[in-house]
Amino acid sequence: MTTKSAAAAARATVYGYPRQGQSRELKKAVEGYWRGRVTANALRDTAAGLRRTNWRQLAEAGIDEVPTGDFSYYDHVLDTTVMVGAIPARHRAAVDADALEGYFAMARGTQDAAPLEMTKWFDTNYHYLVPELSPDTVFASDSAKQVAEFKEALALGLTARPVLVGPVTYLLLAKPAPGVPPDFNPLTLLDRLLPVYAEVLADLRAAGAEWVQLDEPALVQDRTPAELDAAACAYRDLGAFTERPRLLVASYFDRLGEALPVLAKAPVEGLALDFTEAGAANLDGLAAAGGLPGKRLVAGIVNGRNIWVNDLEKSLSTLGTLLGLADRVDVTASCSLLHVPLDAAAERDIEPQILRWLAFAKQKTAEIVTLAKGLAQGTDTIAAELAANRAALASRTGSPITNAPDVRARATAVTDAAARRSQPYAERAGTQRARLGLPLLPTTTIGSFPQTGELRTARADLGAGRIGTADYEERIRAEIQEVISFQEKTGLHVLVHGEAERNDMVQYFAEQLTGYLATQHGWVQSYGTRYVRPPILAGDISRPEPMTVRWTSYAQSLTSRPVKGMLTGPVTMLAWSFVRDDQPLGETARQVALALRDEVNDLEAAGTPVIQVDEPALRETLPLRAGDRPAYLAWATEAFRLTTGGVRPDTQIHTHMCYAEFGDIVQAIDDLDADVISLEAARSHMQVARELAAHGYPREAGPGVYDIHSPRVPSAEEAAALLRTGLKAIPAERLWVNPDCGLKTRGWPETRASLENLVAAARTVRSEL
Ligand code: GLN
Ligand code: ZN
């Protein structure tokens, strides 16, 4: 009985859709607004138009219930901060004066007020703005955005479900405001926050919302009993509130584990769970908890964060099992489709036989609709879709692209020794010092210099055939000359060529490696108005020829100072690409590492004394559950060592990571066996330096003294103060001076001023030693 009605009722829905529009209209409008070229009203109109287009597209594709409130000008966690009135004191005046200006001030900072800290959204490449809370925080509800967007969807005649970041996740993602003791636990504010959520829920219900979705992805991480209790209390209290719509509590990216029985027992009307590989254990967990009798189950069965076509038959079988466990089973993607590009059909350069392996947001929507139909009306009604799906899957499994014998043989033959430098760090550090002859507190940058409009235009011109390769390369050489001469003039010690030739630090390599696919329009939001086009690890990976050597060599030919070679590491290549789902990640990482190892060795042979292998993504790929981490770190660190293990002792290997808190992976960073690491630290007041010291990290390190995520220019005094703080944790012999990250998103004026201040700060502090 249950099974039959649950099946008949199956509906299709999603939690969120790409925000940017077909041609990244949102990016253009927001950036235009920042530059004063687009009015606030024009920006609002563009945004409303994009929301309408998305909803119509979803409805036309057969989605029964569309999400609202998932849209954002910058970030949905920042929107939640506004919704609960947790505006940091330093931004209060700006927000009160003009809500939109104040909103962007919190996101980007102003000359007087630092922005909110930005960090990774779980293990994705989306970044959110971290809420800052204190014992004095007074929440106040502001449901205007949620209510307005819900009404917009209603006005189109659609069934809509507002989607909010849930209160427990909001607090778990928050951090103590500046000046508040670091041991302050934002979760203690739950009692104060819940009434505000209750008000928002009441407002949404008054506006006509039947269901509201509260996202609680933080509950898929390891949680203490106290945190689980807090979740139980939160949903007991919200559940008991009478003026509310029905509540759907959603989780994604991993299994709920211990939190599953907590939520299953909570007095809410529905749960949304991840049933892809990441959340596969939810199936047993749900059965063990006794299912969800009387409740709605929304089953995330289509992978919302990868781009491969779904195995529809396998999904239908899982959905069939779920039918016995809830009153109603709806079909959806495992998470918001924010994490995948919009439309695979827009790709013109991908061969048709590969294109059929791919599903972006639009195609996933169709898969969800097909699965819901198959579930509700029987598989005969989707026979054609099933046949096409079977053929696509078979063509992928049987393709020579996914099975290259030489690549597989080389990966299998890798020995332990290949992943180890020939001398231990303590010995080779001296050799490197002698070769490089650098002063104390040497200065360097992270690699990229401003990617100017001119450079992007030149690349676009090359792509469109308006200029030839020779012309293009001439422009790149001119840029390298300028970057080198600026660095010499400014007095930096270890120079970089500036990465002018790179459209993106992953895509640039992906385009040159066999087995990797680049997309033309596959944009995915990374943060704010920054979008990336993650390439696709589609097949077995190999490097047909050197990728960077001539640019680095050219730069080195222009100066007598050491020039740093610059590569993206294997873990980051994986993390910022769409990965294969048909072999273990470690297997793919090893193939990429071997290809990069050839490049590292070629750079060394060309005379490059310093080679940086960036691994900014090492930590974000860390599995969300601690128990899954050792296995990941084992293959990840091996891949890095395999990339860099083939060089001589006097070649200095740098690595770079962009996060400020990494206490939990210092051991893994040590295991990379790099000689120098540069890290993001400016916004967190050199926190990393203390964490390295606490671990007894023995190598050289450059905690960043210039926050490159903001257009703000740090003064020399400010940078010097940070350096002095750094010196308290790291001795001068091992401290480097550098920005937080690459400068590609910055303009030249602020880059120039900031680097001059950075060099001046290093000079001042050096003179105090
Ligand atoms: N070398 C890269 C750059 O400077 C590193 C970027 C990053 O870590 N995200 O752009
Ligand atoms: Zn970085």
Image (spheres, rainbow, N blue to C red):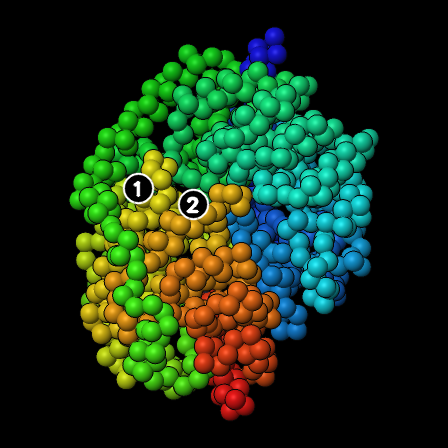
Residue under label 2: 631
Q: Is residue 100 left or right of residue 453?
A: right
| Residue furthest top as drawn | 1
Mark 2: give few (<14), some (14-19) or many (20+) Cα within 10 Å.
few
SS assignment at label 2 = helix
Front-most of residues 445 and 264: 264
Residue 685 image position (x, y, % from top left): 60, 71
Residue 512 image position (x, y, % from top left): 25, 54
> Residue at (27%, 41%) from the top-left corner?
539
> Residue at (27%, 31%) from the top-left corner?
397
Regarding residue 728, the answer to whether it shows in the image is: yes
Q: Is residue 670 above or below residue 767?
A: above
Report the Cα–Cα distance between label 1 and label 2.
Answer: 23 Å
Residue 168 image position (x, y, % from top left): 69, 44
Which of the 4 quarters of the picture holds residue 604? Answer: bottom left
> Residue at (24%, 50%) from the top-left corner?
414
Residue 577 image position (x, y, % from top left): 38, 48
Mark 1: give few (<14), some (14-19) or many (20+) Cα within 10 Å.
many
Instruction: Give the residue type at disc 2.
Output: Ala
Q: Is mark 2 within 8 Å of ligand 1?
A: no
Of the 4 image quadrants, the one containing the N terminus is top right
Q: Is residue 54 above or below residue 768?
A: above
Q: How many marks?
A: 2
Residue under label 1: 538
Regarding residue 109, the answer to whether it shows in the image is: no
Mark earlier in primary sequence (1, 2): 1
Q: Is residue 625 left or right of residue 568?
A: right
Q: Is residue 722 above or below residue 104?
A: below
Q: Which mark is residue 301?
A: none
Number of the front mark, 1 or 2: 2
> Residue at (32%, 32%) from the top-left corner?
356
Instruction: Give the residue type at disc 1.
Output: Ala
